[in-house]
Image (cartoon, grey):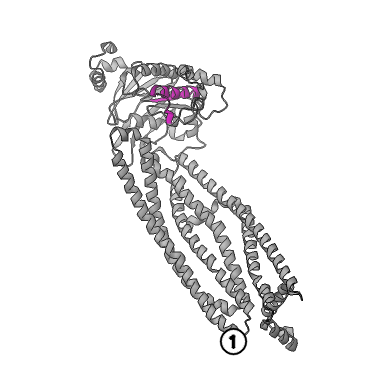
């Protein structure tokens, strides 16, 4: 119930539309009951030989002993019946029949009017509610720490926002449309049955407790089965996303059959879970309906005997009562389906709220606003570990002067990228402190920090949009001349001009229409346009050929001017001009200095340099 209450919080902004929709639903149900009541005048006109025993007897009794001697409900019932019948009464049966036909037309016209607006308002509430949930999920997803994404499969997150939200949508639709409609119809038909003969009505309802008990028991099983197959769907989405993203590797290693078998295993698990769910949900409807039929049979037997014996129930009243009871079967069956969809939706809602309850990234909102780096970025005894693993960084103490180019080198797993991530506040140190101009990084407003940062990594992220939009990411109103200036500084303007559509060229998913070097230069142009005070270059040239590296390196030289730059590089030729080189090994700083100083002494840097060049470039050793 807690999940349902939280879900209803998203409905509150649309309470006006919901109220109008519920009102239209109630009026729709009311006119459905009135349309059912047309059975009485219709049968009286066609079968005038049958006498209204109840009404005649009641009228005679009232005349003999006085109106006040009868219960109020009995008098109201008789008065209402007479008023309703008088609307269609006439000495000529044909005129009465014509009035009945006109009445049926008007009743169904009004009923259709309310049905139309019921659906319009309810659809508005459903779609607006689901939009708000989906927007909240996406917005929350963007505020989660990087560590969450490192531990969670992308496909699972996609499944949350697509499949789970769709299941919640179905639940909201059933609650606000099907439930209100069929619950209202059930109440109206129940009211008709009670008005006609309350003893018969009670007899037909003896099965209701059995239906309620069965529904409660089956709800638990439905929710458990629904949770399982939704989790299976998340794994299917994740496997599909990973295969599509890594299709080159799949084909290169000839692993098509392996991936197909893995996908088949996931879909097989989903099918088994879903069939278990459907077996339970399909069972709910016929059992509920059959229990309802038991009540109807009791009515047929008992009420039929009442009519045959003439004990206060006329044929018209019995037909109306029977029609009301039989019309209750459809709402009962539909409400059973609503329960099935609701259990499925609640299981999805729980998964959604688990994501929404995941702690967000600490942003230090209202903290110090960073406007640039005036002196330095300083690490003091910084240690960081991922969960319970061995420390990725241990007791790191370094200084990155303002405007300096500082390079991080070392073997894979030494902690280079982790150190850069700490500067960007993608992670928070386990111990120690990072300062920017003497201010603790943890107290700096994160949006202001990242507004001063530019990051160019080995894995370039470009969007399926135009070159212009990728360079001016998030800045839609920039003039083209400003964008071209950044592109020229990144050595990108020339190859962009070779495209027929120039800067309007759409580059495809992840920039697939561009080469590796071209993608890097687009990313560098984007960073130049942002004009950041702090720049992080993470393996920016490691996967390029010689010509592309030369162009990218030239663009980087334009980019790093007058900026505090942190460079992560395996290719040592790209950092020969760095102001300071910090050598990391197993998370610790083992050497510091410039290229000449480090090459002139024994240590890890010289070993890495010699392994990389193997005496093939003696000029680099100077």
Q: Is residue 279 visible?
A: yes
Image vertical order of residue 74 relative to residue 178, above or below: below
> Magenta residues, as a range?
510-537
Splitting the image into 4 quarters, where does residue 460 fall? top left
Q: Residue furthest front?
A: 94
Q: Residue furthest right?
A: 91
Image vertical order of residue 598 relative to residue 174, above or below: above
Please tell me whether mark 1 sits on a helix, a strand or a loop: helix
Q: Which residue is mark 1?
A: 309
Name the residue nearer the viewer: 302 or 19. Answer: 302
Q: Is residue 63 left or right of residue 249?
A: right
Q: Is residue 399 left or right of residue 450?
A: left
Crowding at dot 1, Cα within 10 Å, few <14 / some 14-19 / many 20+, comes out as few
Q: Is residue 440 left or right of residue 601?
A: right
- Is 56 magenta? The answer is no
Name the residue nearer the viewer: 107 or 242. Answer: 107
Residue 277: percent from the left, percent from the top?
Answer: 40, 58
Q: Residue at x 47, y 71 (%)?
A: 290
Name the residue nearer the viewer: 252 or 597. Answer: 252
Tell me which secondary structure the magenta stretch mostly adopts.
helix
Residue 500: percent from the left, percent from the top?
Answer: 50, 21
Name the residue nearer the viewer: 326 or 216. Answer: 326
Q: Residue at x 37, y 41 (%)?
A: 240
């Amino acid at each position: 119930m807690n999940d349902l209450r939280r879900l209803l919080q998203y409905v509150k902004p649309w309470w006006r539309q919901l109220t109008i929709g519920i009102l239209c639903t109630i009026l729709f149900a009311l006119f459905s009951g009135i349309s059912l009541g047309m059975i009485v005048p219709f049968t009286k006109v066609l079968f005038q030989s049958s006498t209204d025993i109840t009404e005649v007897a009641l009228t005679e009794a009232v005349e003999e002993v006085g109106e006040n001697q009868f219960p109020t409900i009995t008098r109201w019932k008789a008065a209402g019946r007479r008023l309703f019948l008088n609307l269609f009464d006439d000495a000529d049966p044909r005129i009465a029949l014509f009035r009945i036909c006109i009445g049926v037309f008007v009743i169904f016209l009004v009923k259709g009017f309310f049905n139309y607006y019921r659906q319009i308002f309810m659809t508005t509430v459903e779609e607006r509610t689901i939009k708000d949930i989906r927007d909240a999920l996406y917005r929350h997803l963007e505020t989660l720490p990087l560590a969450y994404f490192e531990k969670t499969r992308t496909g699972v997150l996609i499944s949350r926002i697509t499949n789970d939200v769709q299941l919640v949508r179905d639940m909201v639709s059933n609650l606000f449309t099907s439930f209100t409609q069929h619950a209202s119809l059930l109440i109206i038909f129940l009211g008709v049955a009670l008005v006609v003969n309350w003893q018969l009505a009670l007899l037909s309802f003896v099965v209701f407790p059995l239906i309620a008990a069965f529904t409660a028991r089956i709800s638990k099983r439905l929710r458990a089965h629904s949770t399982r197959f939704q989790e299976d769907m998340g794994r299917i989405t994740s496997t599909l996303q990973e295969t599509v993203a890594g299709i080159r590797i799949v084909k290169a290693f000839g692993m098509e059959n392996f991936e197909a078998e893995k996908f088949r295993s996931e879909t097989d698990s989903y099918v088994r879970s879903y069939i278990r769910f459907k077996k339970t949900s399909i069972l709910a409807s016929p059992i509920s309906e059959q229990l309802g039929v038991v009540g109807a049979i009791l009515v047929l037997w008992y009420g039929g005997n009442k009519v045959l014996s003439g004990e206060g129930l006329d044929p018209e009243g019995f037909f109306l009562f029977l029609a009301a009871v039989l019309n209750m079967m459809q709402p009962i069956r539909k409400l059973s389906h609503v329960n099935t969809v609701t259990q499925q939706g609640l299981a999805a809602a729980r998964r959604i709220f688990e994501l929404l309850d995941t702690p967000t990234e600490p942003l230090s909102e209202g903290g110090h606003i960073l406007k640039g780096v005036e002196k330095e970025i300083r690490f003091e005894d910084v240690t960081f570990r991922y969960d319970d693993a061995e420390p990725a960084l241990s007791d790191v103490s370094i200084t990155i002067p303002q405007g300096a180019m500082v390079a991080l080198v070392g073997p894979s797993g030494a902690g280079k990228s982790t150190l850069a991530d700490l500067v960007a506040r993608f992670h928070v140190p386990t111990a120690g402190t990072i300062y920017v101009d003497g201010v603790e990084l943890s107290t700096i407003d994160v949006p202001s920090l990242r507004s001063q940062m530019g990051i160019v990594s080995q894995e370039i992220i470009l969007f399926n949009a135009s070159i212009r939009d990728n360079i001016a990411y998030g800045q839609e109103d920039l003039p083209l001349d400003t964008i071209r200036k950044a592109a020229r500084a990144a050595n990108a303007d020339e190859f962009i001009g070779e495209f027929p559509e120039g800067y309007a060229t759409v580059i495809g998913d992840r920039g697939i229409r561009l080469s590796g070097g071209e993608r890097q230069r687009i990313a560098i142009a984007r960073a130049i346009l942002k004009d950041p005070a702090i720049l992080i270059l993470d393996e920016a040239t490691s996967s390029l050929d010689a010509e592309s590296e030369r162009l990218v390196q030239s663009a980087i030289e334009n980019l790093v001017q007058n900026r505090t730059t942190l460079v992560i590089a395996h290719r040592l030729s790209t950092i020969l001009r760095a102001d300071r080189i910090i050598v990391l090994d197993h998370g610790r700083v083992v050497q510091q200095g410039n290229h000449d100083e480090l090459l002139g002494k024994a240590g890890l840097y010289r070993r890495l340099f010699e392994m990389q060049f193997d005496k093939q470039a003696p000029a680099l050793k100077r």
